[in-house]
Each structure stands twice: as C-alpha cells, then as structure tokens.
Amino acid sequence: MAEAWEKRKLIAIVEDDPHLAAMLSDMLKFFGQWRLQIFSDGQTAKDQLPELGAALILLDVGLPNLDGGSLYKILRGHSNTKNTPIIVITGIHDWELHRMGLQASLLLRKPFNLQELLTIIRALLPEEE
C-alpha cells in the first residue's frame, strides 16, 4: 500500500491563504490520485521544493518571506525544478507581474474556476495506467 502511495505524483501547493490552500488540497484529493505538500511561505518553499521532486507546483504570487515572483525565478534557475510545470496563481495585474519580471507561461487569475485548474493539472500530469 505504501508503494502505491509513493508512486503517486506529487503536487506542491505554495499558498499563504489557509482557506484557499485547504480548498485546493480538498479538490485535488477528491479528483485525483496525487500526493500533496503545502507550503505557506516562499522561504520554506525555496528551501525544500528543489529536493522534493514535485511533478507540478501551484504558486501564489503574494507570499510572505519571499514573494512568488522571486521564488518562481529561483525555481526556474535550479537544476531540479527548471523543467517542473509551475502554475502561477495571482490576483494582481499584468503590469505588476511585468514589473516583477514574471512571465509565467501558466497563469491563473483569482478568482479562478476550479474545473479549469483541474483540467490544466490533468493535461500536465496524465494519470498512469
């Protein structure tokens, strides 16, 4: 049983809003066969994510201790996470993202549709037979 659990792909959720983190976690547990790791601040995520082996990262821009824009750049520069899909979740405007130097290819604006997020995740992490 533990082996099957370990084979599940890991999704890292980097979100400081406990309600949104819990909602994302509940949705992903209900609709998918993934393992989840939640980080509530950017610094902890920076310290642990590169060695975690996540298959996908959900990243909020507005984080304490290290903002999501800076964390995104660090993760993209690290050999272990440079190719990991990162879905950036934000409530800020394009010009603010541009000012942060953040040109994320996968961007979801708050408020977002959970079904849309689930569709993107399933496309990025197809379930194995």
Image (cartoon, rainbow, N blue to C red):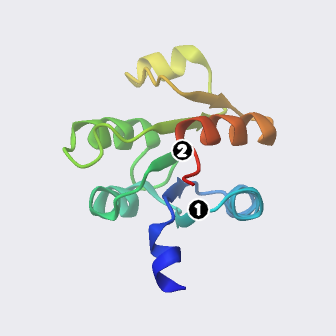
Q: Is residue 44 left or right of residue 37?
A: left
- Of 122 and 82, nearer the camera is 122
Judging by the rendered image, the residue that carries numbered circle 2 is 125
Badge 1: few (under 14), some or many (20 or more) residues near its Cα, within 10 Å?
many
> Residue at coordinates 43% horizontally, 51% vertically from top-left?
55
Quadrant where the N terminus sits is: bottom right
Q: Residue furthest front?
A: 129
Quarter location, residue 83: top left
To which residue does mark 1 refer?
Answer: 34
Per the image, label 1 sits on a secondary structure element best described as loop
> Quadrant where the C terminus lies?
bottom right
The residue drawn where x is 34% and y is 59% is 53
Does the CB distance between marks 1 and 2 fall below 8 Å? yes
Where does residue 127 sit, x and y in percent of width and height? 59, 50
The kind of residue tagged 2 is Leu
Q: Position of residue 66 (x, y in %)?
A: 39, 50
The reply to whether residue 60 is visible in this rendering is no
Q: Residue furthest left?
A: 79
**Badge 2 density bin: few <14, some 14–19, many ≥20, Cα 10 Å:** some
Q: Is residue 38 above or below residue 4?
A: above
Q: Amino acid at mark 1?
A: Trp
Tag 2 or tag 1, which sits nearer the N-term?
1
